[in-house]
């Protein structure tokens, strides 16, 4: 019997169809569970339907059954959850989840990609980026929405644990982009148990001391320690050419950790400040994530006008690296990586044959 190939989304947006500026999180621990029956990696938000009339903390049976069947049919069951960044409404969240799944599959990843969508706000609401540092759990700003999403994020993580119990050998991965990494860092800070395999952090808009081994509390150092503690490996993909994060670092400096103003996705882990968590891999993608390299790719590989900040979704060499990482290739054995003198720090080496 053939296994149905569907597409799956999870969200804690109070009203997924509301305009971007009015986004707010669901209260409490509830989630909406959306499914498209039109095929895998569906990028059209209109194809998705909610499979519950009210928010639920765990997946409805009609939603979870085809997902479990698809995962059990894999030789090595693998689920990757994508968490988007800032300026993403429901349609953007669906589009980029499907795009990531499609492009990773094109590079050999054989797992299933689903999306978790938090209530991001629009670019025009940049002045509402935060409400002080550390931000309060008050909906109405970008990071306020994130902090108010912690309880429902906990429901999502608990669901991944329960899913692993239904699919023997399942490996759960996370891929987070930009501000989605702040959602991850904030959401994981209160998680007691999880069993994540690979965590991939793309262009992370979090502080560059997030993975520094912290001294005893209270401290703002090592705010991402729970991510490392509850995962097998974390890989930080960063580029010094990311002008979006450079702008964020400068304009919103008062909203960042005062001890570590650098952006993790711009300069990578702050190795000079102290030792980092031992399972965190720093990968400098500057030789590939740059305008000159992108301009040499065949026309249409990276859409015209796309910012370098989102080019990770399109550049074949970056996607091939991610596919190998999600497939558990050891960090030092991933193709076209060069080792540095710093422990667990690598450089992505540009190849001219990327297409």
Image: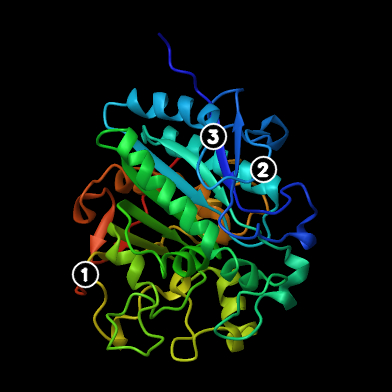
Going from the N terminus, do you reach mark 2 or mark 3 first?
2
Q: Please state which of the two labelled residues, at mark 2 or mark 1, is closer to the viewer.
A: 2
**Image coordinates for residue 155, horizontal then vertical, percent:** 48, 53
**Image coordinates for residue 181, horizontal then vertical, percent:** 49, 64
Query: Separation of disc 1 and disc 3 at Cα?
Result: 38 Å
Q: How many marks?
A: 3
**Circle 3 Cα neighbour tier, 10 Å, few/some/many (<14 / 14–19 / ≥20):** some
Residue placed at 44% from the left, 73% from the top? Answer: 264
Query: Separation of disc 2 and disc 1 at Cα?
Result: 42 Å
Quarter of image, res 33: top right
Q: Nearer the viewer, residue 347 or 139?
A: 139
| Pointer 3 residue | 60
| Pointer 1 residue | 278
Q: Is residue 203 left or right of residue 322?
A: right
Could one spot residue 298 in this view of the protein?
no
Quarter of image, res 8: top right
Going from the N terminus, do you reach mark 2 or mark 1 first?
2
Q: Is residue 353 left or right of residue 117?
A: left
Residue placed at 64% from the left, 67% from the top? Answer: 145
Q: Secondary structure at mark 1?
A: loop
Going from the N terminus, do you reach mark 1 or mark 3 first?
3
Residue placed at 30% from the left, 52% from the top? Answer: 195
* Above or below for 170 versus 85: above
Q: Please state which of the two labelled residues, at mark 1 or mark 3, is closer to the viewer.
A: 3
* Above or below for 350 versus 205: above
Q: Secondary structure at mark 3?
A: loop
Label ID, residue 54? 2
* Above or below for 3 versus 109: above
């Amino acid at each position: 019997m053939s296994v149905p190939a569907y597409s799956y989304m999870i969200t804690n947006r109070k009203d997924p169809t509301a305009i971007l500026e009015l986004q707010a999180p669901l209260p409490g621990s509830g989630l909406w569970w959306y499914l498209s029956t039109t095929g895998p990696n569906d990028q059209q938000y209109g194809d998705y339907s909610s499979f519950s009339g009210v928010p639920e903390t765990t997946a409805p049976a009609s939603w979870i059954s085809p997902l479990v069947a698809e995962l059990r049919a894999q030789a090595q069951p693998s689920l990757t959850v994508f968490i988007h960044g800032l300026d993403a409404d429901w349609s953007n969240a669906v589009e980029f989840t499907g795009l990531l799944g499609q492009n990773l599959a094109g590079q050999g990843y054989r797992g299933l990609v689903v999306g978790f969508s938090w209530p991001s706000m629009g670019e025009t609401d940049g002045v509402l980026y935060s409400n002080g540092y550390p931000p309060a759990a008050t909906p109405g700003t970008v990071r306020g929405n994130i902090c108010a999403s912690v309880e429902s994020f906990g429901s999502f993580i608990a669901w991944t644990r329960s899913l692993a119990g239904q699919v023997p050998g399942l490996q759960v991965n996370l891929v987070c982009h930009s501000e989605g990494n702040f959602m991850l860092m904030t959401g994981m800070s209160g998680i007691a148990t999880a069993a994540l395999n690979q965590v991939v952090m793309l262009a992370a808009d979090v502080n560059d001391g997030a993975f520094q081994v912290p001294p005893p509390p209270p401290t703002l150092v090592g705010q991402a320690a729970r991510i490392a503690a509850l995962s097998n490996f974390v890989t930080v993909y960063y580029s010094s050419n990311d002008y979006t994060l450079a702008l964020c670092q400068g304009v919103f400096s008062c909203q960042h950790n005062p001890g570590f103003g650098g952006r993790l996705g711009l300069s990578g882990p702050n190795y000079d400040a102290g030792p980092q968590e031992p399972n965190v891999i720093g990968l400098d993608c500057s030789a590939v994530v740059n305008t000159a390299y992108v301009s040499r790719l065949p026309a249409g590989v990276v859409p015209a006008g796309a910012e370098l900040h989102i080019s990770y979704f399109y550049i074949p060499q970056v996607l091939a690296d991610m596919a190998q990482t999600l497939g558990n290739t050891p960090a030092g054995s991933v193709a076209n990586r060069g080792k540095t003198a710093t422990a667990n720090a690598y450089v992505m080496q540009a190849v001219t044959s990327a297409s």
